[in-house]
Amino acid sequence: MNYEIIGNLLAGILILMVYSYLYKETPVFRLGEHIFIGLTIAVSLVMVLDAIKKIAILPILNGDLLLIIPLGLGCLVFFAFSKEYYYIYRVPLAIIIGVGTGLSIVGQTHGSLITQVIATILPITTPDIATNLNNILILIGTITVASYFIFTVKQSGPLKYSARLGRYMLMVAFGSSFGATVMTRVAPAFSQVSFLLTTEAIYTIPIVIAALAITSYMDRTKKSAKL
Amino acid sequence: MDLRKVSKDPRIIYLITFILLGVPVLYPIGIPIPISDITRDVYNFIETLPEGSVVVIGIDYGAVSVPELQPQSEALLEHALMKNFKILFISLWNFEAPIYIERTMKAVGMDDYEYGIDYVNLGYFPGEGRAMSSFAEDIHQLAKYDYYGTPIEQLQMMNDITSAHDLNAYLSIAGSGHGQFINMIQTPYNVPWIFGSEAVAATGLIPYIASGQAEGIIIGPRGAAEYEAIIGAIGSATAQMDVQSLVHLMIIIAVILGNISYLMNKGEN
Protein backbone atom coordinates (compact mmCIF):
# COMPACT_ATOMS: atom_id res chain seq x y z
CA MET A 1 0.00 0.00 0.00
CA ASN A 2 1.41 3.35 -1.02
CA TYR A 3 1.01 5.52 2.04
CA GLU A 4 2.27 8.60 0.22
CA ILE A 5 -0.71 8.52 -2.14
CA ILE A 6 -3.11 8.11 0.76
CA GLY A 7 -1.37 10.98 2.56
CA ASN A 8 -1.62 13.23 -0.49
CA LEU A 9 -5.33 12.45 -0.94
CA LEU A 10 -5.98 13.12 2.74
CA ALA A 11 -4.02 16.38 2.58
CA GLY A 12 -5.98 17.42 -0.53
CA ILE A 13 -9.30 16.76 1.19
CA LEU A 14 -8.23 18.73 4.29
CA ILE A 15 -7.03 21.67 2.15
CA LEU A 16 -10.34 21.82 0.28
CA MET A 17 -12.32 21.41 3.51
CA VAL A 18 -10.68 24.56 4.87
CA TYR A 19 -10.91 26.44 1.56
CA SER A 20 -14.67 25.72 1.47
CA TYR A 21 -14.91 28.71 3.84
CA LEU A 22 -14.44 30.94 0.80
CA TYR A 23 -17.85 29.74 -0.43
CA LYS A 24 -19.45 29.88 3.00
CA GLU A 25 -18.89 28.58 6.53
CA THR A 26 -20.02 24.98 6.83
CA PRO A 27 -19.55 22.11 9.33
CA VAL A 28 -17.00 20.74 6.84
CA PHE A 29 -14.84 23.85 7.29
CA ARG A 30 -15.20 23.66 11.06
CA LEU A 31 -14.12 20.01 11.05
CA GLY A 32 -10.99 20.89 9.05
CA GLU A 33 -10.25 23.78 11.41
CA HIS A 34 -10.59 21.60 14.51
CA ILE A 35 -8.36 18.90 13.02
CA PHE A 36 -5.70 21.55 12.35
CA ILE A 37 -5.90 22.94 15.89
CA GLY A 38 -5.79 19.46 17.42
CA LEU A 39 -2.78 18.43 15.35
CA THR A 40 -0.90 21.64 16.22
CA ILE A 41 -1.43 21.07 19.95
CA ALA A 42 -0.38 17.43 19.61
CA VAL A 43 2.83 18.35 17.77
CA SER A 44 3.67 21.04 20.35
CA LEU A 45 3.13 18.56 23.20
CA VAL A 46 5.38 15.93 21.62
CA MET A 47 8.13 18.44 20.83
CA VAL A 48 8.14 20.02 24.29
CA LEU A 49 8.12 16.65 26.07
CA ASP A 50 11.00 15.53 23.88
CA ALA A 51 12.92 18.68 24.78
CA ILE A 52 12.29 18.13 28.51
CA LYS A 53 13.51 14.56 28.14
CA LYS A 54 16.77 15.69 26.51
CA ILE A 55 17.40 18.74 28.69
CA ALA A 56 16.39 17.39 32.10
CA ILE A 57 15.31 13.77 32.41
CA LEU A 58 18.15 12.00 30.57
CA PRO A 59 20.88 14.09 32.30
CA ILE A 60 19.25 13.40 35.71
CA LEU A 61 19.23 9.68 34.98
CA ASN A 62 22.91 9.97 34.03
CA GLY A 63 23.85 11.55 37.37
CA ASP A 64 23.32 15.31 37.00
CA LEU A 65 21.03 15.50 40.07
CA LEU A 66 21.11 19.31 40.33
CA LEU A 67 18.64 19.45 37.43
CA ILE A 68 15.94 18.04 39.74
CA ILE A 69 15.52 21.57 41.11
CA PRO A 70 14.48 23.28 37.84
CA LEU A 71 12.42 20.21 36.85
CA GLY A 72 10.59 20.41 40.16
CA LEU A 73 10.06 24.13 39.80
CA GLY A 74 8.65 23.54 36.32
CA CYS A 75 6.18 20.99 37.68
CA LEU A 76 4.91 23.59 40.20
CA VAL A 77 3.36 25.44 37.22
CA PHE A 78 0.61 22.81 37.14
CA PHE A 79 -0.71 24.15 40.45
CA ALA A 80 -2.37 26.81 38.29
CA PHE A 81 -5.16 24.25 37.84
CA SER A 82 -5.71 23.92 41.60
CA LYS A 83 -8.28 26.21 43.20
CA GLU A 84 -6.80 25.67 46.67
CA TYR A 85 -3.05 25.94 45.91
CA TYR A 86 -3.22 28.20 42.89
CA TYR A 87 -0.69 30.66 44.41
CA ILE A 88 2.17 28.13 44.26
CA TYR A 89 2.40 28.47 40.47
CA ARG A 90 3.53 32.08 40.91
CA VAL A 91 6.94 30.89 42.18
CA PRO A 92 8.21 29.33 38.94
CA LEU A 93 6.45 32.03 36.94
CA ALA A 94 8.32 34.72 38.88
CA ILE A 95 11.63 32.96 38.18
CA ILE A 96 10.83 32.64 34.46
CA ILE A 97 9.82 36.30 34.18
CA GLY A 98 12.72 37.49 36.32
CA VAL A 99 15.36 35.60 34.33
CA GLY A 100 13.79 36.63 31.03
CA THR A 101 13.60 40.29 32.04
CA GLY A 102 17.15 40.32 33.32
CA LEU A 103 18.51 38.81 30.13
CA SER A 104 16.34 41.05 27.93
CA ILE A 105 17.38 44.30 29.59
CA VAL A 106 21.02 43.76 28.78
CA GLY A 107 20.40 42.47 25.28
CA GLN A 108 17.68 44.90 24.27
CA THR A 109 19.37 47.99 25.65
CA HIS A 110 22.44 47.39 23.58
CA GLY A 111 21.02 45.47 20.61
CA SER A 112 17.78 47.33 19.93
CA LEU A 113 18.37 50.76 21.41
CA ILE A 114 21.97 51.95 21.60
CA THR A 115 23.17 50.30 18.39
CA GLN A 116 20.14 51.55 16.46
CA VAL A 117 20.52 55.12 17.75
CA ILE A 118 24.20 55.10 16.76
CA ALA A 119 23.19 53.85 13.31
CA THR A 120 21.04 56.94 12.73
CA ILE A 121 24.02 59.26 13.27
CA LEU A 122 25.07 59.42 9.64
CA PRO A 123 27.24 61.83 7.62
CA ILE A 124 25.29 64.23 5.38
CA THR A 125 28.26 65.75 3.53
CA THR A 126 29.74 62.80 1.66
CA PRO A 127 30.88 63.12 -1.99
CA ASP A 128 27.84 61.08 -3.14
CA ILE A 129 24.67 63.23 -3.34
CA ALA A 130 22.35 60.21 -3.26
CA THR A 131 23.93 59.00 0.00
CA ASN A 132 23.60 62.49 1.50
CA LEU A 133 19.90 62.67 0.58
CA ASN A 134 19.33 59.16 1.92
CA ASN A 135 21.03 60.00 5.23
CA ILE A 136 19.10 63.28 5.60
CA LEU A 137 15.85 61.36 4.98
CA ILE A 138 16.80 58.80 7.66
CA LEU A 139 17.60 61.60 10.11
CA ILE A 140 14.36 63.50 9.45
CA GLY A 141 12.31 60.30 9.49
CA THR A 142 13.77 59.12 12.81
CA ILE A 143 13.21 62.48 14.56
CA THR A 144 9.72 63.13 13.18
CA VAL A 145 8.44 59.59 13.83
CA ALA A 146 9.83 59.69 17.38
CA SER A 147 8.11 63.08 17.90
CA TYR A 148 4.78 61.58 16.75
CA PHE A 149 4.84 59.33 19.84
CA ILE A 150 5.33 62.19 22.34
CA PHE A 151 2.03 62.22 24.21
CA THR A 152 3.19 63.76 27.53
CA VAL A 153 2.87 67.30 26.20
CA LYS A 154 0.30 68.81 23.87
CA GLN A 155 1.37 68.52 20.24
CA SER A 156 1.34 72.20 19.28
CA GLY A 157 3.71 74.57 17.54
CA PRO A 158 6.78 72.93 15.91
CA LEU A 159 5.97 69.59 17.57
CA LYS A 160 2.60 69.52 15.77
CA TYR A 161 4.22 69.81 12.34
CA SER A 162 6.98 67.38 13.24
CA ALA A 163 4.43 64.84 14.47
CA ARG A 164 2.34 65.26 11.32
CA LEU A 165 5.36 64.63 9.11
CA GLY A 166 6.16 61.63 11.30
CA ARG A 167 2.66 60.31 10.71
CA TYR A 168 3.12 60.56 6.94
CA MET A 169 6.44 58.73 7.27
CA LEU A 170 4.67 55.97 9.22
CA MET A 171 1.99 55.74 6.52
CA VAL A 172 4.66 55.22 3.87
CA ALA A 173 6.32 52.54 6.01
CA PHE A 174 3.03 50.75 6.68
CA GLY A 175 2.13 50.96 3.00
CA SER A 176 5.40 49.26 2.15
CA SER A 177 4.70 46.62 4.76
CA PHE A 178 1.19 46.08 3.32
CA GLY A 179 2.65 45.49 -0.12
CA ALA A 180 4.95 42.86 1.36
CA THR A 181 1.98 41.33 3.20
CA VAL A 182 0.34 40.55 -0.14
CA MET A 183 3.40 38.45 -1.06
CA THR A 184 3.27 36.72 2.32
CA ARG A 185 -0.40 35.81 1.83
CA VAL A 186 -0.03 34.67 -1.78
CA ALA A 187 2.79 32.25 -0.94
CA PRO A 188 0.73 29.78 1.17
CA ALA A 189 -2.15 29.97 -1.32
CA PHE A 190 0.23 29.10 -4.17
CA SER A 191 1.73 26.30 -2.12
CA GLN A 192 -1.66 24.68 -1.53
CA VAL A 193 -2.91 25.13 -5.11
CA SER A 194 0.38 23.81 -6.46
CA PHE A 195 0.09 20.76 -4.19
CA LEU A 196 -3.49 20.16 -5.33
CA LEU A 197 -2.61 20.36 -9.02
CA THR A 198 0.68 18.43 -9.03
CA THR A 199 -0.05 15.46 -6.77
CA GLU A 200 -2.73 12.79 -6.45
CA ALA A 201 -4.80 15.35 -4.53
CA ILE A 202 -6.02 16.63 -7.92
CA TYR A 203 -8.59 13.80 -7.89
CA THR A 204 -10.29 15.35 -4.85
CA ILE A 205 -11.08 18.60 -6.74
CA PRO A 206 -14.00 17.28 -8.89
CA ILE A 207 -15.54 15.67 -5.80
CA VAL A 208 -15.46 18.95 -3.91
CA ILE A 209 -16.75 20.96 -6.89
CA ALA A 210 -19.68 18.54 -7.16
CA ALA A 211 -20.34 18.87 -3.41
CA LEU A 212 -20.28 22.69 -3.66
CA ALA A 213 -22.64 22.62 -6.68
CA ILE A 214 -25.11 20.41 -4.79
CA THR A 215 -24.87 22.65 -1.69
CA SER A 216 -25.45 25.77 -3.79
CA TYR A 217 -28.46 24.18 -5.53
CA MET A 218 -29.95 23.11 -2.21
CA ASP A 219 -29.45 26.64 -0.79
CA ARG A 220 -31.24 28.21 -3.79
CA THR A 221 -34.08 25.70 -3.51
CA LYS A 222 -34.49 26.52 0.19
CA LYS A 223 -34.50 30.27 -0.54
CA SER A 224 -37.14 29.99 -3.28
CA ALA A 225 -39.25 27.69 -1.04
CA LYS A 226 -39.15 30.36 1.71
CA LEU A 227 -40.24 33.04 -0.78
CA MET B 1 -19.50 45.79 -15.91
CA ASP B 2 -21.12 46.99 -12.69
CA LEU B 3 -18.18 47.29 -10.31
CA ARG B 4 -20.48 47.45 -7.30
CA LYS B 5 -21.53 43.81 -7.84
CA VAL B 6 -17.87 42.74 -7.68
CA SER B 7 -17.27 44.67 -4.47
CA LYS B 8 -20.37 43.13 -2.82
CA ASP B 9 -19.43 39.53 -3.67
CA PRO B 10 -15.72 38.86 -3.04
CA ARG B 11 -16.07 35.29 -4.36
CA ILE B 12 -15.50 36.68 -7.86
CA ILE B 13 -12.09 37.94 -6.69
CA TYR B 14 -11.40 34.56 -5.02
CA LEU B 15 -12.23 32.73 -8.26
CA ILE B 16 -9.95 34.97 -10.34
CA THR B 17 -7.19 34.53 -7.74
CA PHE B 18 -7.51 30.73 -7.87
CA ILE B 19 -7.29 30.79 -11.66
CA LEU B 20 -4.17 32.98 -11.51
CA LEU B 21 -2.68 30.67 -8.85
CA GLY B 22 -3.35 27.53 -10.86
CA VAL B 23 -2.66 28.41 -14.49
CA PRO B 24 1.08 29.16 -14.10
CA VAL B 25 1.51 25.86 -12.25
CA LEU B 26 0.24 23.97 -15.30
CA TYR B 27 1.65 26.38 -17.93
CA PRO B 28 4.76 28.15 -16.52
CA ILE B 29 5.44 31.56 -18.05
CA GLY B 30 9.05 32.06 -16.93
CA ILE B 31 9.00 35.79 -16.12
CA PRO B 32 12.67 36.84 -15.65
CA ILE B 33 13.80 37.54 -12.07
CA PRO B 34 16.35 40.35 -11.71
CA ILE B 35 18.63 39.85 -8.69
CA SER B 36 18.57 42.60 -6.05
CA ASP B 37 21.65 43.93 -4.27
CA ILE B 38 20.25 42.98 -0.89
CA THR B 39 20.16 39.27 -1.82
CA ARG B 40 23.53 39.41 -3.52
CA ASP B 41 25.04 40.81 -0.30
CA VAL B 42 24.04 37.58 1.46
CA TYR B 43 25.68 35.48 -1.24
CA ASN B 44 28.84 37.60 -1.24
CA PHE B 45 29.16 37.37 2.53
CA ILE B 46 28.83 33.58 2.56
CA GLU B 47 31.40 33.41 -0.24
CA THR B 48 33.92 35.22 2.00
CA LEU B 49 33.74 32.50 4.65
CA PRO B 50 36.55 29.95 4.33
CA GLU B 51 36.01 26.22 3.85
CA GLY B 52 35.33 24.45 7.13
CA SER B 53 33.63 27.45 8.74
CA VAL B 54 31.13 26.66 11.48
CA VAL B 55 27.73 27.89 10.39
CA VAL B 56 24.46 27.61 12.28
CA ILE B 57 21.34 27.20 10.18
CA GLY B 58 18.62 28.25 12.60
CA ILE B 59 15.30 27.06 11.22
CA ASP B 60 12.57 28.69 13.32
CA TYR B 61 9.31 28.61 11.42
CA GLY B 62 6.12 26.62 11.37
CA ALA B 63 3.57 25.47 8.83
CA VAL B 64 2.25 28.98 8.23
CA SER B 65 5.62 30.27 7.02
CA VAL B 66 6.76 27.18 5.12
CA PRO B 67 5.88 28.43 1.60
CA GLU B 68 8.03 31.53 2.10
CA LEU B 69 10.87 30.25 4.23
CA GLN B 70 11.37 26.62 3.21
CA PRO B 71 12.87 27.62 -0.20
CA GLN B 72 15.26 29.95 1.66
CA SER B 73 16.39 27.13 3.98
CA GLU B 74 16.99 24.81 1.05
CA ALA B 75 18.91 27.43 -0.94
CA LEU B 76 21.11 28.41 2.02
CA LEU B 77 21.80 24.77 2.93
CA GLU B 78 22.67 24.07 -0.70
CA HIS B 79 25.17 26.94 -0.68
CA ALA B 80 26.62 25.94 2.72
CA LEU B 81 27.23 22.41 1.44
CA MET B 82 28.89 23.73 -1.72
CA LYS B 83 31.30 25.66 0.52
CA ASN B 84 32.00 22.61 2.74
CA PHE B 85 30.94 24.33 5.93
CA LYS B 86 30.41 22.55 9.24
CA ILE B 87 26.65 22.93 9.69
CA LEU B 88 24.78 23.06 12.99
CA PHE B 89 20.97 22.88 12.77
CA ILE B 90 18.98 24.22 15.68
CA SER B 91 15.60 25.70 16.54
CA LEU B 92 15.19 28.13 19.43
CA TRP B 93 11.84 29.71 18.62
CA ASN B 94 9.27 27.42 16.99
CA PHE B 95 8.38 23.90 18.19
CA GLU B 96 7.34 22.84 14.67
CA ALA B 97 10.78 23.63 13.25
CA PRO B 98 12.42 20.18 13.69
CA ILE B 99 9.97 18.84 11.10
CA TYR B 100 11.26 21.42 8.63
CA ILE B 101 14.90 20.86 9.56
CA GLU B 102 14.41 17.24 8.51
CA ARG B 103 12.48 18.29 5.41
CA THR B 104 15.24 20.70 4.38
CA MET B 105 17.93 18.04 4.79
CA LYS B 106 15.84 15.55 2.82
CA ALA B 107 15.09 18.03 0.02
CA VAL B 108 18.75 19.01 -0.47
CA GLY B 109 20.16 15.52 0.18
CA MET B 110 22.81 14.87 2.82
CA ASP B 111 23.92 11.40 1.65
CA ASP B 112 27.40 12.62 0.69
CA TYR B 113 27.97 14.11 4.14
CA GLU B 114 28.63 12.38 7.44
CA TYR B 115 26.47 13.10 10.44
CA GLY B 116 28.48 14.17 13.48
CA ILE B 117 31.43 15.24 11.35
CA ASP B 118 29.96 17.49 8.62
CA TYR B 119 26.63 18.39 10.20
CA VAL B 120 24.69 18.03 13.45
CA ASN B 121 21.00 18.49 14.22
CA LEU B 122 20.37 19.67 17.78
CA GLY B 123 16.59 20.01 17.37
CA TYR B 124 14.30 22.34 19.32
CA PHE B 125 14.85 23.93 22.72
CA PRO B 126 11.97 25.74 24.45
CA GLY B 127 12.46 28.95 26.38
CA GLU B 128 12.92 31.46 23.53
CA GLY B 129 15.17 34.28 24.86
CA ARG B 130 16.40 32.15 27.76
CA ALA B 131 17.24 29.26 25.44
CA MET B 132 19.00 31.65 23.06
CA SER B 133 21.10 33.11 25.86
CA SER B 134 21.95 29.65 27.16
CA PHE B 135 22.89 28.44 23.67
CA ALA B 136 25.15 31.41 23.09
CA GLU B 137 26.93 31.04 26.45
CA ASP B 138 27.41 27.27 26.60
CA ILE B 139 26.04 25.03 23.85
CA HIS B 140 27.02 21.82 25.64
CA GLN B 141 25.18 22.92 28.81
CA LEU B 142 21.95 23.48 26.84
CA ALA B 143 22.23 20.62 24.36
CA LYS B 144 23.49 17.56 26.19
CA TYR B 145 21.91 15.38 23.49
CA ASP B 146 21.24 15.99 19.82
CA TYR B 147 17.81 15.67 18.18
CA TYR B 148 18.25 11.91 17.78
CA GLY B 149 19.27 11.30 21.42
CA THR B 150 23.02 10.95 20.83
CA PRO B 151 25.15 12.43 23.63
CA ILE B 152 26.86 15.52 22.33
CA GLU B 153 30.29 14.31 23.47
CA GLN B 154 30.02 11.53 20.88
CA LEU B 155 29.65 14.02 18.01
CA GLN B 156 33.13 14.85 16.74
CA MET B 157 32.07 18.14 15.14
CA MET B 158 30.85 19.50 18.48
CA ASN B 159 34.22 19.04 20.25
CA ASP B 160 35.41 22.48 19.12
CA ILE B 161 32.02 24.22 19.19
CA THR B 162 31.16 25.24 22.75
CA SER B 163 29.66 28.74 22.51
CA ALA B 164 28.63 31.49 20.12
CA HIS B 165 32.27 32.61 20.05
CA ASP B 166 33.05 29.52 17.96
CA LEU B 167 30.49 30.35 15.26
CA ASN B 168 31.57 31.91 11.96
CA ALA B 169 28.00 32.79 10.93
CA TYR B 170 24.38 32.32 11.99
CA LEU B 171 21.85 31.94 9.19
CA SER B 172 18.57 32.65 10.95
CA ILE B 173 15.51 31.67 8.95
CA ALA B 174 12.57 32.55 11.16
CA GLY B 175 8.93 33.55 10.94
CA SER B 176 9.30 35.91 13.90
CA GLY B 177 11.46 36.62 16.94
CA HIS B 178 14.38 38.10 14.99
CA GLY B 179 14.78 40.87 17.53
CA GLN B 180 15.37 38.41 20.38
CA PHE B 181 17.98 36.54 18.37
CA ILE B 182 19.84 39.80 17.75
CA ASN B 183 19.60 40.86 21.40
CA MET B 184 20.52 37.50 22.91
CA ILE B 185 23.07 36.03 20.49
CA GLN B 186 24.28 38.43 17.80
CA THR B 187 24.99 41.61 19.78
CA PRO B 188 26.56 40.13 22.95
CA TYR B 189 28.81 37.74 21.01
CA ASN B 190 29.23 39.70 17.76
CA VAL B 191 28.19 36.74 15.61
CA PRO B 192 28.00 37.48 11.86
CA TRP B 193 24.29 37.28 11.09
CA ILE B 194 22.11 36.60 8.04
CA PHE B 195 18.34 36.96 8.12
CA GLY B 196 15.90 34.83 6.19
CA SER B 197 12.52 36.38 6.73
CA GLU B 198 8.97 36.66 5.47
CA ALA B 199 8.28 39.61 3.19
CA VAL B 200 6.01 41.23 5.76
CA ALA B 201 8.76 41.22 8.43
CA ALA B 202 11.54 42.50 6.19
CA THR B 203 10.89 46.24 6.66
CA GLY B 204 11.44 45.83 10.40
CA LEU B 205 14.78 44.08 9.86
CA ILE B 206 16.41 46.50 7.43
CA PRO B 207 17.55 48.75 10.33
CA TYR B 208 19.65 45.86 11.68
CA ILE B 209 21.49 45.72 8.35
CA ALA B 210 21.90 49.49 8.28
CA SER B 211 23.42 49.36 11.80
CA GLY B 212 25.84 46.60 10.83
CA GLN B 213 24.30 44.01 13.16
CA ALA B 214 23.41 41.80 10.20
CA GLU B 215 25.26 41.19 6.94
CA GLY B 216 22.18 40.78 4.74
CA ILE B 217 18.66 39.49 4.37
CA ILE B 218 16.76 37.16 2.08
CA ILE B 219 13.24 38.57 1.79
CA GLY B 220 10.39 36.15 1.27
CA PRO B 221 9.96 33.86 -1.70
CA ARG B 222 11.30 36.52 -4.08
CA GLY B 223 14.60 36.58 -2.19
CA ALA B 224 14.70 32.79 -2.23
CA ALA B 225 14.10 32.76 -6.01
CA GLU B 226 16.92 35.25 -6.50
CA TYR B 227 19.23 33.16 -4.31
CA GLU B 228 18.35 30.02 -6.27
CA ALA B 229 19.29 31.88 -9.45
CA ILE B 230 22.61 33.05 -7.99
CA ILE B 231 23.71 29.60 -6.81
CA GLY B 232 22.28 27.89 -9.90
CA ALA B 233 19.86 25.61 -8.01
CA ILE B 234 16.40 26.34 -9.37
CA GLY B 235 13.70 25.26 -6.93
CA SER B 236 10.22 25.92 -5.61
CA ALA B 237 10.72 29.65 -5.07
CA THR B 238 11.43 30.25 -8.77
CA ALA B 239 8.27 28.36 -9.69
CA GLN B 240 6.32 30.65 -7.40
CA MET B 241 7.40 33.90 -9.03
CA ASP B 242 5.07 33.78 -12.05
CA VAL B 243 2.14 33.44 -9.67
CA GLN B 244 3.37 36.24 -7.40
CA SER B 245 3.70 38.61 -10.38
CA LEU B 246 0.23 37.82 -11.75
CA VAL B 247 -1.56 38.00 -8.41
CA HIS B 248 0.17 41.27 -7.50
CA LEU B 249 -0.95 42.69 -10.87
CA MET B 250 -4.49 41.55 -10.11
CA ILE B 251 -4.36 43.22 -6.67
CA ILE B 252 -3.20 46.49 -8.26
CA ILE B 253 -6.02 46.35 -10.83
CA ALA B 254 -8.53 45.51 -8.08
CA VAL B 255 -7.36 48.47 -5.96
CA ILE B 256 -7.68 50.82 -8.97
CA LEU B 257 -11.13 49.46 -9.87
CA GLY B 258 -12.17 49.70 -6.22
CA ASN B 259 -11.22 53.37 -6.13
CA ILE B 260 -13.03 54.03 -9.44
CA SER B 261 -16.13 52.32 -8.01
CA TYR B 262 -15.89 54.47 -4.87
CA LEU B 263 -15.63 57.65 -6.94
CA MET B 264 -18.54 56.57 -9.15
CA ASN B 265 -20.72 55.93 -6.08
CA LYS B 266 -19.66 59.25 -4.56
CA GLY B 267 -20.55 61.02 -7.83
CA GLU B 268 -24.00 59.41 -7.93
CA ASN B 269 -24.71 60.33 -4.28
Image (tube, coloured by chain):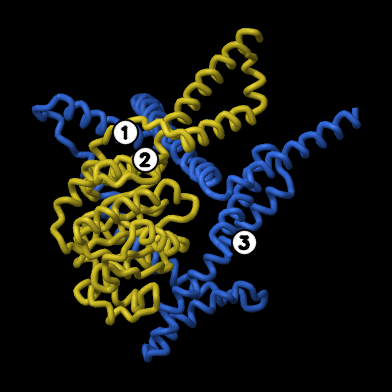
Chain colours: A blue, B yellow
**In this view, which residue lies farthest toward the left?**
A127
Q: Is residue A214 above or below residue A15?
A: above
Give the CA distance from mark 1 to mark 3. 40 Å
Residue nearer the viewer, A204 or A184: A204
Q: Nearer the viewer, residue B242 or B59?
A: B242
Badge nearest the viewer, 2 or 3: 2
Q: Quadrant of the N terminus of chain A?
A: bottom right
Task: Name the residue beneath numbered marker 1.
Answer: B33
Residue B117 in view: yes
Left or right: A162 in relation to A94: left
Q: On the rendered structure, is A201 left or right of B149?
A: right
Query: Residues under labels 2 and 1: Cα distance?
Result: 8 Å
Secondary structure of residue under mark 3 = helix
Whether labels 2 and 1 belong to a single chain: the reply is yes
Question: Tag 2's secondary structure?
Answer: helix
Q: 10 Å neighbourhood of mark 2: few (<14), some, or many (≥20)?
A: many
- Circles 2 and 3 on the same chain: no
> Which numbered disc flags the more N-terminal residue, 2 or 1?
1
**Residue A194 coordinates in the image, percent (x, y):** 50, 43
Amino acid under disc 1:
Ile
Q: Chain of mark 1?
A: B
Tell me the residue that label 2 is attached to: B238
Q: Secondary structure at mark 1?
A: loop
Horizontal side of A167 relative to B47 (left or right) equals right
> Could you tell me the amino acid type at mark 2?
Thr
- In the picture of the structure, the residue carrying the numbered disc 3 is A38
Q: Examine the image and state in which quarter residue B136 appears.
A: bottom left
The residue located at (39%, 85%) in the rendering is A59
Q: Do the residues under discs 2 and 1 have CB atoms within 8 angstroms?
A: yes
Looking at the image, residue B231 lies above or below residue A105: above
Looking at the rendered structure, the kind of residue marked 3 is Gly
